[in-house]
Image (spheres, rainbow, N blue to C red):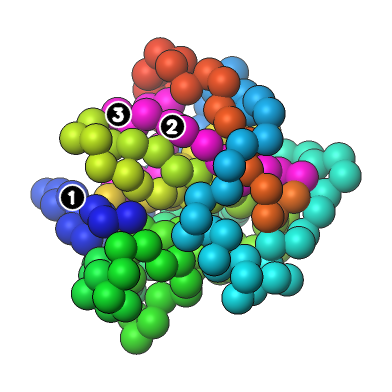
Amino acid sequence: MRTNVGRRSGSFAVGAILSVLFSIAPALADSAMEVGRLTSQPIGHYEFCQSNPDECSITTIAPKREKLTDSMWRKIVSVNAAINRQVRPVSDMELYGVEEFWTYPVNGAGDCEEYVLAKQLELRNAGLSMSNLLITVLRQRNGEGHAVLTVRTDKGDFVLDNLNEKVVEWHNTDYTYLKIQSSRHSGKWVSITNADVPMTATVR
């Protein structure tokens, strides 16, 4: 996607943000994304799957949400901050000469999909199920396309975003959510049926 080559600046250093977030225990909330029928696969993900078929053929018959422990929360927050810090925001056009190209970060650079794929891989290597690490595409308030990683837990669905150091519940954003990777098959996508859920701050 063409946007997301800049980061939202904040007045707090990453370390300060992490120290605050590490002390947060997300409250149980009825905040899960509700998904609908199968929908079209983003072209960038389709092409990624052609080059990485093993990453797009992972199936889960009865996916269960991750149990969100304190240690897992710390891991999720630290991975989001670390990848945001490590990857330099550069558009696909600058890197590859095309509008859309999904891959893992090359030479420490990439746009929103590269951030997402890197975070997905890191958390998967840390033991989280692929069925709970779902690429999600959405539209920003300015109309630009964007991608984030949604982590499904028993205390809500949280987004890891290269435009935000904080990990927040999906509906506590100003995005319009479009579709999400299926929790049952990593190469398929489904619609989001409750994308208009009221924004409510549930991480305090």
- Tell me the tag on residue 125: none
- Tell me the tag on residue 174: 3
Work out how far the residue at label 3 is from the one at label 1, CA to CA, in angstroms: 14 Å
In the image: residue 70, left or right of residue 170: right
Work out how far the residue at label 2 is from the one at label 1, CA to CA, in angstroms: 19 Å
- In the orientation shown, which residue stands out farthest toward the right? 61
- The answer to which of 145 and 7 lies nearer the viewer is 145
What's under tag 3, amino acid-wise? Answer: Asp
* Residue annotated with mark 2: 177
Q: Which callout, 3 or 2, points to the residue nearer the camera?
A: 2
Q: Which residue is at a point 47% across and 71% down the rendered structure image?
A: 103
As drawn, 15 above or below 197? below
- In the orientation shown, which residue stands out farthest toward the bottom? 107
In this orientation, does residue 22 appear?
A: no
* Residue annotated with mark 1: 8
- The quadrant holding residue 183 is top right
Which portion, as a residue range, is magenta?
164-184
Instruction: Choose the circle earlier in sequence order: 3 or 1.
Output: 1
Work out how far the residue at label 3 is from the one at label 2, CA to CA, in angstroms: 9 Å
Residue 172: horizontal and vertical position, in percent? Answer: 38, 27
